[in-house]
């Protein structure tokens, strides 16, 4: 009889486990606390800021989630979107209804359709400055709103009810491309009440202010020492059921130790077993570690943006000469985890849709080897024999090493180049916050040449190339000018020929014609050269044998949701005591 009762109890307990889902937790334990080095510091957690550094993309992707995501093959999958339907009641316009899954912000409030409507309107406001606006230009009145020719209330985006978002388009569009664009972190939902309460300048910089809807959220921001990301307590969990905390996200905390920027100290910590993931490797160790690293292509191009209003740099021949002086193969070798840039658009960006490559379809636009003779000839044609300017870079090992190489080659052309290494600075209004001084300088346009990671907003080349057309730049309208002038790209580049190509691509009903116009636009862009692409970036990381479950998406960033650390309780006591 006792055996029978025991058997029944065992069956009941097993059934309960199956109903609640598998768990890694025991008792009151919340899960593993994992020491790692994800990437360099991120000082602003607003997903709509200009992403000038791949570090921002990596961290934003952990903290925010949009309607869709891209798998490792570039196929879009549902994220917050449960499903959608074409609106049959709207016969005159092309509209869709998007139904949201049940999920929550980190303060416990549900993620609602109004959060997407607010986020997208914020992006398209004529006073806002953000190139990601191009992701939404197929939406009804979106472009006119950005140009100041329509009210934000005219946007074809509305919350029909709490969990239903209606999107009306200018015309029938390729919904696959639209949902691919929706995977961009820039189109994540945002909380109007939070941003209104703390203001645009502060809400995304202080851990106690930041509310996110992704798998992790920042809890401790202590630069230059530590960033503590913690599992969202409500991410997709059904609050009416007793679901396991680790049902959707296994780790409890990710501790990003910065070791005050000392990459070799981070590598030593990894080798000693005190951190389990290393997301950036010392330059002088990369070649020997290449066989051990997990490497993936990113949709990002390390690029030098040129201030075309600078008198010395205003002639396209001068800018082309600067480009020709660079041996991109040598630049890629410096970084190890990079490929020579053969154009502005990297290889993973689509041409006419998933499974096609813009880069492969259109071939090389840039040479990868140096041509000093042609560079000097172009300078002679332009009447330039030298001059002085500044190259601004983030104060990271990789960016400064590239800058040292490039400026050495430019000096062979007779130029005197100063490298301006930017460090983060203390926030003037809140002494416990740190500003991204580099981002502030970039946004101001107060530079001669500036080095950024030009991160593709989506796998559609339009979103990257349209930024250089004045009407499509996303930088908004100068409301104080007499004629409400449009702000061009941050480089100051403006070309009627280029604008016409982007306009034709935007209005084209043919995928092949659209791709052809965008290919022509890239060639013209790199003929006029307001930007100098240097290398296509790759991501590389080391992972301890104690850690498993990391996956990468199409953007080349890591997903830590299902990561498990072996025997994590062994490390937990020491980790909690230290942190």
Image (cartoon, rainbow, N blue to C red):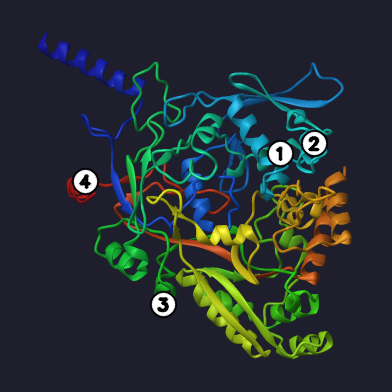
Q: CA distance from mark 4 to mark 1?
A: 44 Å
Q: Nearer the viewer, mark 3 or mark 4?
A: 4
Give the Cα distance between marks 1 and 2.
8 Å
Say if mark 1 contacts mark 2, CB within 8 Å.
yes
Q: Could you tell which of marks 3 and 4 lies nearer the N-terminus?
A: 3
Task: State the SS at label 2.
Answer: loop
Say if residue 411 shows up in the picture: yes
Between disc 2 and disc 4, the foreground one is 4
**Residue at image location 88% in from the left, 59% down from the top:** 496
| Mark 1 lies on residue | 178
Residue at coordinates 81% horizontally, 51% vertically from top-left?
Answer: 485
The CA span between labels 2 and 4 is 52 Å
The residue singled out by tag 2 in the image is: 173
Q: Which residue is mark 3?
A: 284
Crowding at label 2, few (<14), some or many (≥20) Cα neighbours within 10 Å?
some
* Residue on which the image places disc 4: 576
Q: Nearer the viewer, mark 4 or mark 1?
A: 4
Q: Earlier in the sequence, mark 4 or mark 1?
A: 1
The mark total stands at 4
Q: Earlier in the sequence, mark 3 or mark 1?
A: 1
Q: Residue furthest left?
A: 2
Identify the image quadrant of residue 151: top right
């Amino acid at each position: 009889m006792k055996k029978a009762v025991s058997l029944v109890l065992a069956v009941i307990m097993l059934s309960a486990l199956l109903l609640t889902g598998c768990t890694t937790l025991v008792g009151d334990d919340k899960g593993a606390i994992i020491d790692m080095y994800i990437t360099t510091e991120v000082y602003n957690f607003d997903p709509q800021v200009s992403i000038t550094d791949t570090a921002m993309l990596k961290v934003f992707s952990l903290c925010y989630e949009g309607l869709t995501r891209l798998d490792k093959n570039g196929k879009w999958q549902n994220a917050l979107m449960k499903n959608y339907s074409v609106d049959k009641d709207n016969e005159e316009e092309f509209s869709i209804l998007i139904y949201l899954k049940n999920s929550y912000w980190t303060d416990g409030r549900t993620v609602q359709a109004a959060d997407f409507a607010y986020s997208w309107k914020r992006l398209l406001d004529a006073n806002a400055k953000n190139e990601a606006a191009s992701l939404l230009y197929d939406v009804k009145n979106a472009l006119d709103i950005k140009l100041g020719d329509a009210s934000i209330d005219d946007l074809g985006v509305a919350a029909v009810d709490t969990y239903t978002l209606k999107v009306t388009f200018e015309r029938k569009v390729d919904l696959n491309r639209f949902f691919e664009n929706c995977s961009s972190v820039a189109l994540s939902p945002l909380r109007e009440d939070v941003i209104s309460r703390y203001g645009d300048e502060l809400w995304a910089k202080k851990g106690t202010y930041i509310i996110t809807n992704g798998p992790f959220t920042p809890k401790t921001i202590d630069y230059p020492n530590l960033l503590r990301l913690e599992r969202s307590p409500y991410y997709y969990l059904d609050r009416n059921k007793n679901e396991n905390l680790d049902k959707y996200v296994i780790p409890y905390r990710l501790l990003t130790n910065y070791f005050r920027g000392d990459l070799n100290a981070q590598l030593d910590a990894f080798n000693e077993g005190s951190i389990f993931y290393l997301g950036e490797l010392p330059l002088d160790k990369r070649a020997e570690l290449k066989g051990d690293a997990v490497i993936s292509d990113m949709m990002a191009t390390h690029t030098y943006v040129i201030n075309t209003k600078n008198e010395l740099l205003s002639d396209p021949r001068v800018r082309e000469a600067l480009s020709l002086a660079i041996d991109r193969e040598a630049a890629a070798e410096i970084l190890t985890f990079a490929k020579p840039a053969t154009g502005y658009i990297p290889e993973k960006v689509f041409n006419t849709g998933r499974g096609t490559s813009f880069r492969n379809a259109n071939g090389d636009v840039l040479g990868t080897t140096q041509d000093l003779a042609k560079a000097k000839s172009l300078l002679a044609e332009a009447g330039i024999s030298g001059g002085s300017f500044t190259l601004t870079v983030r104060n990271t090992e990789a960016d400064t090493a590239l800058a040292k190489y490039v400026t050495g080659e430019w000096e062979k052309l007779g130029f005197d180049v100063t490298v301006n290494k930017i460090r983060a600075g203390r926030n003037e209004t809140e002494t416990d916050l740190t500003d991204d001084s580099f981002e502030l300088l970039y946004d101001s346009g107060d530079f001669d040449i500036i080095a950024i990671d030009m991160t593709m907003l989506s796998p559609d080349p339009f979103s990257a190339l349209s930024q250089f057309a004045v009407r499509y730049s996303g930088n908004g309208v100068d409301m104080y000018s007499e004629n409400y002038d449009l702000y061009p790209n941050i480089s100051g580049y403006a070309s009627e020929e280029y604008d016409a190509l982007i306009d034709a691509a935007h209005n084209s009903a043919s995928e092949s014609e659209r791709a052809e116009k965008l290919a022509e636009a890239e060639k013209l862009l790199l003929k006029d050269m307001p930007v100098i692409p240097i290398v296509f970036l790759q991501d590389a990381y080391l992972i301890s044998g104690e850690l498993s479950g990391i996956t990468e998406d199409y953007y080349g960033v890591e997903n830590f949701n299902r990561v498990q650390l072996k025997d994590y309780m062994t490390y937990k006591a020491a980790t909690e005591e230290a942190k």
